[in-house]
Image: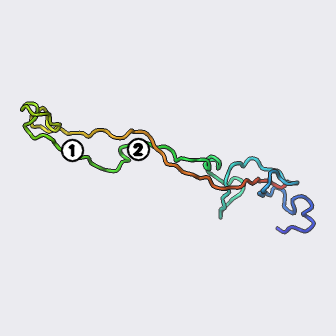
Amino acid sequence: MFITPGSRAKGGGGFPPGTAMLFWQASAPLGWTKITTQNDKLLRVVSGAGGVGGGGGSNAFSSVNAQTVVGSSTLSSAQLAAHTHTMSAYESAGSGPSSGGSANPLLLAGQGVYAAPATDSAGSGSSHNHTISFSILYIDLILASKN
């Protein structure tokens, strides 16, 4: 589109009605109407179809930009790395309670039968998060359409 020299005085130049433009100012210029249905969003350049109806996402720019932590998460056993815990006997067979020795956690009542020992529980099971800062610099623009 070409703008003729005399068309600038008409408020909006030679732009046809309905043309949308960005302005770096508080209000729409004479002959334009501020579009208020689009608010708190980023701009994305696409090679396909753009314009009315184009866009996506579900989180407002200011909400994401103000985020300081990633969502909290509690790890389940399935999310932990595979690992083992070792335990060693501190008594020998035959030294359990029935033979007058001290109790051996690996023997059941001195009968020479080994039990499956368990290690003590560790960890709190509470959630954790990681800090993050999206505090990206930005400028505010308005979108307006030609009357």
Element at label 2: loop
> Which residue is depicted at the point 53% across and 47% down?
69
Q: As drawn, is 44 to the left or to the right of 77?
A: right
- Which residue is label 1 attached to? 87
The image quarter containing residue 138 is bottom right
Depth-wise, is mark 2 or mark 1 nearer the camera? 1
Q: Is residue 58 visible?
A: no
As measured in the structure, the alpha-carbon distance from the residue carrying label 2 to the one carrying label 1 is 25 Å
Kind of residue indicated by mark 2: Leu
> Which residue is depicted at the point 16% across and 39% down?
106
Residue 117 image point, x, y percent: 21, 39
Q: As drawn, is 142 to the left or to the right of 116?
A: right
Residue 22 image point, x, y percent: 77, 57
Residue 31 image point, x, y percent: 87, 54
Q: As drawn, is 124 to the left or to the right of 51?
A: left
Of mark 2 and mark 1, the one earlier in the sequence is 2
Give above or below for 8 relative to 113.
below
Foreground residue among 3 and 23: 23
Residue 26 image point, x, y percent: 80, 51
Foreground residue among 111 and 30: 111
- Which residue is label 2 attached to? 75
